Amino acid sequence: MSGFDLLYLAGLATITGYLLVGRVPSVLHTSLLAAASLVHGIVLVGAIVVLSSADSLLTRLLGVLAVALASANVVGGFLVTDRLLALFERGKRRRRESAPERKDTMGGS
Amino acid sequence: MRLEAVFWLELGWFLAAICLIAGLRRISTPRATRRGGQLIASGLLLALAVTFAHPAVGRNLWLILGAVLVGGAAIIVPVRRVPATDSSRLIALFNALGGAAAALVAAMHLIDAPARLSQATARRDALQAFDGAFDGVIAPVPGIGSNIASVIALLCGAIAAGGSLVAYWRMSSGSDASWRFEKRQTAYVANAALVLLLGLVLAVTTTAHPIMLLLFAAASLSFGIGMSLPIARADMPVLIALYNAFAGVAVLLDGMVIDNPTMIIAGSLVFAAASLLMRLTARAMNRRLGDVMYSGWGLSLDAPPRPSVGDRVNPIDAAEAAITLGYAARVLVIPGYGMAVSRSHHKLRELVQLLEERGVEVEFVLHPVAGRLPGHMNVLLAEAGVPYDRIIEASDANAEMERIDVALVVGADDIVNPAARGTEGGDLTGLAVIEAERARRVIVLRRGDGIGHAGISNPLMSADNVRVMAGDALASVQSLIGQVKQLD
């Protein structure tokens, strides 16, 4: 792609990002931040591409470091995002389970 | 055969980008589930899998696989060891990792830009030969443009890495002090000038000298570190989002440099989401971004001695508090950092269930910056299984406050401090607080010294409708549970 195509892509994707997360409830701020830190783990793809064309000792060293750091970003980012989201999911499931109970007591009174 | 591989590569990267967008979409709605995170992860895995079909990938394969395994495995234990409620610290760590990786990718590009250029040309030629439809769509970024992009990517990645590491360290060490020294402004400006100078030189030279690159990387790193050292620990949430945005920009520019649309999309999404979260968090704390960055809010090394709380507080014992709560119609629970410290959220949930069985309507109000991080209280309450729809926002709570019979403040101070609305609130002035004092009665569970994080004494504690139950929140909640059970 030419330079300007890339700029268009970046601009449109940024606007998409704003629209996507614009109305996020404050409850989910930390989960979303975790997800964002997972998404930039995509740098692993770039790291692999540059490492595979590295031919000097220096670039290989830098490349291996980049790939290792990016992998840690992906794996850790997923573990934390999943854990945070699981907490919320569990909270919601309990609500669903307890909802009929509440209705019963209200009907009885 | 090579051409088909490139087709699957492009298709895979495209689908991966769609997965990332859809996943983020899922996570930012109130119905967020684990599926959102899994969607993002599968997008990343897909992008990763097809990358091995890249015409350039093939050499150094064992190095790549080894590095992936080592890096991926090394992070598992540290992540497992940190409790979910401290996740923000880990997010800072991931921003450091991603930023550093992005900076390294940019550095490698600068080291052998000519090789990269021919590689991109090869890919363009392959695509053009594959199908006329790709005509002219894929072309390498011209030399100078890609050099500038790499330099900025390196800068942003290094800033994200340095700054995030400081944030990680500050949150792990538990030290409240922000670090300042004499003439730090001069050092900071000198550092910025060095970054600018080296960056300009690197951008216009075709092949970068490794030593110069190292200097530039070091200067960028120390710029990032210097940026976050003077910032108060209370402002760390804003800072984490800021460095997340920096990492996003670094990834975006890397994507431009190595001509990978998925990286551009992912980087842009991260930049957008993180900068928005940064603004939302700052607004929630009623702090201007400029104030966060350029002044030290809250505690510093030379903080004035903490004021002591007035001794005129009205005490209440567990039995009386239980009666007040048990016979109320509407109770509003306002949890704060004290709940997190004492880990009393499970017991609190038990108390609330008891009250609900008695027909009391109980709601939780979460201040956006209750605790030390945004969402801190949310995570704890979710962990304790407090239903999602029983949690309301601070502004809604303030609108309803007159109709609340009892406001139960559990280990919160600054976020209910009425002084924030006046001019005497010191560092708290302007913080949008929960106006608990307008409820009919207020019961405060607190440990004793009576001063919040910001070091401002709280007039709420001595108000006429306020009763204070001293002691550790966990013990207090437990005795409340016992007493409520004894009510008929």
Image (cartoon, coloured by chain):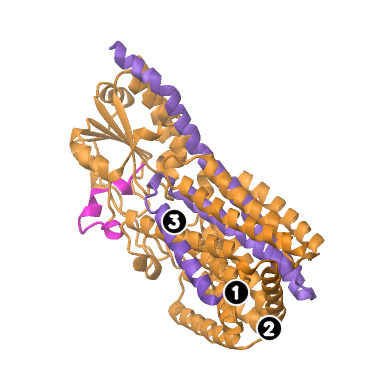
Under circle 1, the secondary element is loop
Residue B283 at x, y = what percent? 33, 57
- In this rendering, is residue A66 above or below B21? below
Q: Which chain is depicted orange?
A: B
- Looking at the image, how many numbered discs can be counted on the residues? 3
Residue B349 at x, y = what percent? 41, 29
- What type is the residue that disc 3 sits on? Pro
The residue under the point 67% across, 71% down is B128
Q: Which residue is mark 1?
A: B136
- In this rendering, is residue B269 above or below B114? above
Chain under label 2?
B
Using residue A99 as the reference point, say whether residue B126 is left or right of it. Answer: right
Q: CA distance from mark 3 to mark 2?
A: 35 Å
Instruction: Please report contact status of discs 3 and 2: CB closer than 8 Å, yes or no.
Output: no
The residue under the point 62% across, 76% down is B140
Mark 1 or 2, nearer chain start: 1
Disc number placed over residue B237 in the picture, else none: 3
